[in-house]
Image: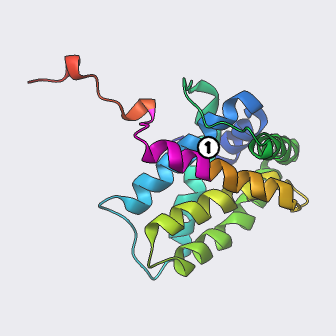
Amino acid sequence: MNTTTADWQGQAVAGLSQLTPDAMPAMELLYLDGLAVHLLGPDAPAPPYTIEHGATIASLLLRALADAPVVELDLEPGDTDGATATARAAIVDGAHRLARSGGLGAQRLVKRFLPAAVGELEQHKEGPEAQVRSLFYYGLLAIASGPENQTNAETSDGVLASFRAWDERIGAGFVPPWRIIDQESTPA
């Protein structure tokens, strides 16, 4: 989602309004992958963390929302206990409620999430893996809470269950499809 200052709200509202339960696994993985690349990669930000660092994290969240409808996954984490499905439904509902407020809903989401993102970066500055987990959690909860900024323990538990499922799957060797390099088309 490459946006200018003038159109970021429109892109954010489109992403929020287009989010569906079927697109949630892709949205989660896109956001998680973006966080991991940014926070665990060679150009990872270093403290002290500023609002610009938080804005980058918010941009990753909005990009995942915008791109999720066009990403198809063959493999997604299970939600056998129902917690993940419940959380995904709450996130979609919160996204749609934010989208109904138009640009104000997008602003509300970002204004709520920015200070939390900076705070989580700072709180977990000794462990980038903890930053990834915490920012995944708070980003999805910020969406689920909708314009009212209210969520519940069941949604919170489901977001953590989703993170654990993705973490386990990635730890077992799962690679997001956009990270797979076709060996036949690479030069020798």
| Residue hosting label 1 | 28
Left or right, 152 with respect to 63, comes to right
The kind of residue tagged 1 is Glu
Can residue 176 be seen here? The reply is: yes
Range of residues picked out in magenta: 164-176
Left or right, 11 with respect to 133, comes to right
Name the quadrant of the C terminus.
Answer: top left
Give the vertical position of 188 relative to 174 (above or below): above
Kindly identify the residue that appears in the image at 45 percent across and 35 percent down.
176
Give the vertical position of 109 relative to 88 (above or below): below
Q: Position of residue 175 (x, y in %)?
A: 41, 36
Give the vertical position of 18 relative to 82 (above or below): above
Q: Position of residue 30 (x, y in %)?
A: 54, 41
Kindly identify the residue that appears in the image at 42 percent across and 57 percent down.
38
Does the magenta-highlighted stretch encompass residue 72? no
Q: Main secondary structure of the magenta part?
A: helix
Q: Position of residue 2 (x, y in %)?
A: 51, 42
* Closer to us: 76 or 141: 76
Does the magenta-highlighted stretch encompass residue 173? yes
* Closer to us: 91 or 53: 91
Name the quadrant of the N terminus.
Answer: top right
Task: Give the residue furthest to the front.
Answer: 81
> Image quadrant of residue 74?
top right
Kindly identify the residue that appears in the image at 87 percent across and 47 percent down.
101
Kindly identify the residue that appears in the image at 52 percent across and 76 percent down.
124
